[in-house]
Amino acid sequence: MAPFSKTCVALAWNFSAECYGVRVQGTSAHFRVLASWRSGPESGESLSGKLITGAAELKANTADQIVAGGGGSTGGFMDIAVPALRGDEQAQALRYELVRYCPLSLDKILWGYRVIGKTEAGQQHVRLFYLPQEEWENWIEAVRGVVAGVDILISPVAALDPVLSGYDVCFPADGEGWYRDTGNGFRDCAAAPAKEERRFGIPEGALEAEGFDPGSLQQRPMREQASFSSAVVLGMYGVSRTADKDKATWLRLPETLRPRRNRVAQTVLLLLVLYLVGFGGYHGAKYGLAALDHHRQLQERNERLKERIAEARTPEEQLEQLRKVKTQLEEASISRPSLGECLLSLTSRTDNGSWVRRFSWQDGKMSIEVVTEKGDVNLTQKWEESPVLADVVPRRRKIDADNRMTINFRLYADDESGTVQSGNSSSNAADGENTEEEVRQED
């Protein structure tokens, strides 16, 4: 057996209160009966009591898939082809089909369906099954005492395909009728099989099918083995891939009947969802508060910028202020002749017999030492006539042995504002007078 096989405990019963059970191990393609159980009407137990005993005899536990169902003709099925629809649309379409084919009123039945596959035309092959509501309630009460719980309640005929696909199947414990394969997984019900070889559940015969190992059933009498066909079909269906998928579209079981593993899984899932919601909510709220605070800070900064912009001067005001500053600078600026202009003026007013031996310039203030061979030199008067000189002050005279005279002058460039001339003339004139007196005393 494949290492990934599953186990299923299947319980089936009929109108005669006969109960059959098997424990099946397998995959979707290979099946083997590990154990079997049977209880006839002679036991005197109730149907519920028999199923409790059978589940215990077969050692059913929450690790097994538990499938149960009753046989007989109280319900009905139909195979139909419908367009591929989704969810509620498909349910509405199938409800319409039930109104057409079901002899009972829809308010008196419960129904479910299985998607078997696709037809050659690309439509969905759906098997509809309906059961009187009263009979469904009897099924619920029959399995209520099974300790391990029940995964799905389904009729053996509804569980066919892909289980035993291509076989004509009979359930001798429920009657002598055959559920014949008419091709592409569709079936009908007839008194005799349509196939000569591929038949399963031949009355008083062995159970034989491709991929099926009867296992412990071979220990039972040949005529008794066929009676287990309904339970075997449910067991094979329980380990197939379609069993879990069909729970979404089949008749829903009460929560209390489901295996405890499902409730534990649902509880864990619920706690996980709550944790994720709480975790996401907490971090979402945290992020939202941080974003809100950041937004508030941006608004405050925006308001401060608006206030600063409102307080700031307009460009026209700034230009007017610059004009005032420029005017003040122009009024306060001092305009005086350059060094070149002063030298040119001095040169043009100096005789050929005189020459400059030393000259210095400092911000319009000049110191000059002149040497002349002429005895009567009036440089002071000539230089004062210069339009670029504001003040000429002789400082010292000296006559050497060669009868050459050396004169020190201090000159001031003319300041158009008049500040230099008025500020320095009096002081330097006094200084000049003192100097002249000193020179005459020396002479």
Image (cartoon, grey):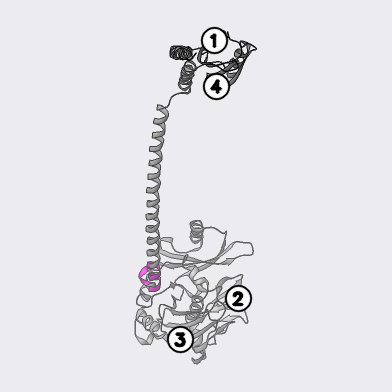
Q: CA distance from mark 2 to mark 3?
A: 26 Å
At which x and y percent is residue 186?
58, 69
Q: Quadrant of the image for the N terminus?
A: bottom right
Q: Secondary structure at mark 3?
A: strand
Q: Tell me the kind of residue under disc 4.
A: Trp
Q: What residue does disc 1 label?
A: 380
Q: Secondary structure at mark 4?
A: strand
Q: What residue does disc 4 label?
A: 361
How many callouts does the rendering have? 4
Q: CA distance from mark 2 to mark 1?
A: 144 Å
> Which one is nearer the viewer's eye here, 64 or 102?
64
Question: Can the viewer see residue 82?
Answer: yes
Q: CA distance from mark 1 to mark 4?
A: 18 Å
> Which one is nearer the viewer's eye here, 422 or 38?
422
Of the residues tagged 2 and 3, which is closer to the observer? 3
Please identify the quarter of the rendering in which residue 150 is found: bottom left
Q: Tell me the kind of residue under disc 1.
A: Thr
Please identify the quarter of the rendering in which residue 124 is found: bottom right
Q: Earlier in the sequence, mark 1 or mark 3?
A: 3
Q: Tell me the kind of residue under disc 3.
A: Ser
Q: Confirm whether the magenta stretch covers residue 259.
A: yes
Residue drawn 38% across the image and 52% down it: 286
Q: Earlier in the sequence, mark 2 or mark 1?
A: 2
Q: What residue does disc 3 label?
A: 36
At which x and y percent is residue 303?
39, 34
Of the residues tagged 2 and 1, which is closer to the observer? 1
